[in-house]
Structure formats: C-alpha cells, structure tokens
Amino acid sequence: MDDVQANLSNLAANEPAFVEPSSADFIADFLTSLNSETEKNQMQLIQEIATKGDDGLAAIMSFLAERRSQPPTTPDGKAYQLLVAANTPSVQDFLQTQFPNGLVSLVTQRNIDYAPLQALLAAQDFQAADRITLEKLCELAGGAAPQRRWVYFSQVTSFPIDDLRTLDTLWLVYSEGKFGFSVQRDLWLAMGKNWEKLWSLIGWKQGNTWTRYPNEFIWDLTAPKGHLPLSNQLRGVRVISSLLNHPAWTK
C-alpha cells in the first residue's frame, strides 16, 4: 500500500497515530502528510479529511491559510470548494477574513467582474458557470457581442492575455485540473490539431452527431477531460481556433 492509501486508511480507522492526542497534532500531522504528496493524492486526502468534522475543517483551513500567498493549485481549489460546501459559521468567518475576494485573484485589463463566475465554480455549478463564461467573453469583445451573445473569431485576438488567463485559472482550479481553455488546447495539440478527433475526445460529438445542448452535455466532474467550457462549434472552428491559438497560452 502506498503512502496516500495508508494515510486514507488511518483516517478512516481513526487511528491514534494520526488523530491524537489533540486537534493541533491532528492538523500538524495532516499538513505533514499532505505536503509530501502529489497534487492528485493531496486532493484525495483533502476529500477524506473533510469528513472528520470540525477537526477536519480546521485542518483544511490551516492548509489554505499556509498557502494564501501562493498561486492557487487544484488541491487549493478542492479545499476551498469543500469549505464553501460546509458553510459553518467558523468556515464562513475564515473565508470572509482570509479570502474576501475568493481563492483566485481576478486579474482583468477590461474591468470585467469575474466574481460571479468564481462563486459558481466554487459551488461546482458548472452549467451556470459555462453560461457566465460566454457572457464574460462577450463583455471582452464589447460592441454588440453582449446583446447577440456570441463573439466573432476576429474579436478573440484582441482579448487581453490577463483576462483569458483569469478565466482559464478559474476553470482549472475548481475542476481538479479537468476543464479550461488550456486543457482543451493541450488535447487539441495532442490530437495533431485535428478538430474531429478533439470533438470526440472531449464529448462534443458522437460519430457524426453533435452533442445537444444542454441535456446531452455533462455538467460535473464525470465529464471527459476538456469537456468544459463550451464554445459554439456549430458556427465552425474559427472562434475556438482563435481561443486555442491565443498568445495567452504561449507567452
């Protein structure tokens, strides 16, 4: 049994070596175990520790507090989501004090408000988050785009790098690294820039049939990697091609 499996087993069994003799020791042991693991294993431990009541939530808060000055990772996103879901008075106070504007810094060059998107992704409401993402892209495009609710491919090239990276980071951090424009780009490149292969891989097309919006799309983490956020591929590949070729991913 590897280290993370052993740690999970200890947690499940409530073994004294891990949870005794005090809450402080419990938290210290958890942080020591967590810091020695890969990101994937960190998320497993964080998920498990969240089931341990107030001590578990305190351990997760300590983890996030230690990492507050660093760029958020997918384990940070997992921890933050679990705290949001817990919604206890102590957790609410912690989040309002330590992360009043959310976990991800919402950098923008166009004065776009990404806070609603962050709240939806933190709550794992991926369908609503997808709709808001399109709204934000239309805001970035400006002009008539917000009214018509889609963007021209030629407008994408003028999107600020910072704003696209903010959108992408939000999706990455709150999806355990599964969703985001950069994820779609990596898969597209791995498919030799073959769009038909990409559509099938990310679940946007089955054979010759496009996946129908919204009911045939998958709005949770059981979806294929790169499944979200959506773009209107029925209008052709120009918009998503412009997004995936944007300098935000290469500079």
Image (cartoon, helix red, strand yellow):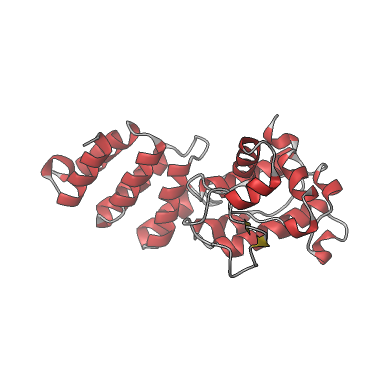
Quarter of the picture holding the C terminus? top right
The answer to whether 40 appears left or right of 55 in the picture is right
The answer to whether 120 is drawn above or below residue 43 in the figure is below
Q: Tell me where residue 120 appears, x and y as whole percent.
A: 56, 60
The answer to whether 51 appears left or right of 84 in the picture is left
Quarter where residue 87 is shown: bottom left
The answer to whether 149 is drawn above or below residue 99 in the figure is below
Is residue 156 something that shows in the picture? yes
Is residue 105 something that shows in the picture? no
Quarter of the picture holding the N terminus? top left
Picture residue at 13% right of the left edge, 45% below the top:
15
Picture residue at 51% right of the left edge, 50% below the top:
174
Q: Nearer the viewer, residue 203 or 182?
A: 203
Q: How many marks?
A: 0
Q: Tell me where residue 92 appears, x and y as whole percent.
A: 42, 59
Q: Residue furthest front?
A: 207
Q: Nearer the viewer, residue 79 or 250?
A: 250
The answer to whether 138 appears left or right of 99 in the picture is right
Q: Nearer the viewer, residue 94 or 242?
A: 242
The answer to whether 28 appears left or right of 68 in the picture is left
The answer to whether 247 is drawn above or below residue 143 in the figure is above
Q: Tell me where residue 249 appears, x and y as whole percent.
A: 68, 35
Picture residue at 44% right of the left edge, 54% below the top:
81
Q: Tell me where residue 232 appears, x and y as whole percent.
A: 73, 58
The answer to whether 53 is drawn above or below residue 60 in the figure is below
Quarter where residue 129 is shown: bottom right
